[in-house]
Image (cartoon, grey):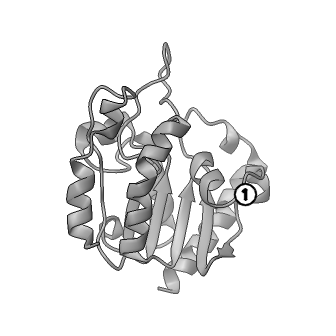
């Protein structure tokens, strides 16, 4: 399917509203055909939902900073980097919490056809998996300490896992884990230099 048509269809999706998972749909897409890096996170944040753009909240800005540290330009987001997520809409907060709710398996299933269609339309060589849900979905359920800092090849694609940059995650509080992130950013720079 033509990516422009696909993105228009995604933007009009209301499946999760109709199923009662969220009160308002605002599916996000960001990218062009031929993007060499396909970035997959968990779901848009509240800031993303309000702005209508992926990776605009505090965690997203930190993620963008990692890409900039690896030699990318801000203008690469949406051009060389296709930004996506397991689900396309902000899932809301956990009840009584300021943390975003992890989309349920049923929500993930409703959105998976869109994500698969985007992958098919873009045909990226490299997938950057941002956070535990994307890593578990596409690569491995192994602990992050066994995955971050490495590059994996599977089914003709390269996979680079990154930890989530949310302040709610304590994974990066460890100096050892910070060194794994530094290794991952070295790998991300190598991938950038190869495209």
**Residue 109 drawn above or below residue 6:** above
183 on left or right of 185: right
For label 1, count other residues whose C-alpha is less than 10 Å away and answer few (under 14), some (14-19) or many (20+): some
Q: Which sits in the foreground, 136 or 128? A: 136
111 on left or right of 97: left
Tell me what residue is drawn at x 50 percent, y 27 percent: 99
| Residue 112 image point, x, y percent | 46, 53
| Residue 138 image point, x, y percent | 61, 59
Q: Which sits in the foreground, 123 or 162? A: 123
Q: Which sits in the foreground, 157 or 73? A: 157
Q: Residue at label 1?
A: 179
**Residue 68 drawn above or below residue 84:** below
| Residue 1 image point, x, y percent | 29, 72
| Residue 55 image point, x, y percent | 38, 49
**Residue 157 drawn above or below residue 6:** below
1 on left or right of 195: left
| The image quarter in which residue 118 lies | bottom left
Q: Residue furthest top?
A: 96
Tell me what residue is drawn at x 69 percent, y 52 percent: 178
């Amino acid at each position: 399917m033509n990516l422009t048509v696909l993105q228009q269809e995604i933007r009009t999706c209301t499946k999760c509203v109709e199923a009662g998972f969220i009160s308002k749909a605002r599916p996000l897409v960001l990218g062009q055909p031929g993007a060499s890096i396909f970035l997959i996170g968990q779901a848009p944040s509240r800031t993303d939902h309000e702005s209508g753009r992926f990776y605009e909240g505090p965690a997203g800005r930190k993620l963008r900073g990692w890409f900039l540290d690896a030699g990318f330009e801000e203008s690469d987001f949406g051009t060389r980097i296709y930004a996506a997520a397991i689900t396309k809409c902000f899932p809301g907060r956990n009840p009584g919490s300021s943390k975003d709710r992890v989309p349920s398996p049923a929500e993930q299933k409703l959105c998976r056809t869109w994500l698969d269609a985007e992958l098919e339309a873009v045909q990226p060589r490299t997938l950057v998996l941002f956070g535990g849900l994307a890593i578990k979905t596409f690569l491995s359920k192994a602990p992050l300490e066994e995955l971050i800092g490495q590059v994996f090849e599977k089914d003709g694609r390269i996979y680079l896992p990154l930890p989530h940059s949310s302040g709610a995650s304590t994974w990066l509080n460890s100096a050892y884990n910070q060194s794994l992130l530094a290794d991952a950013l070295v790998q991300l720079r190598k991938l950038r230099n190869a495209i």
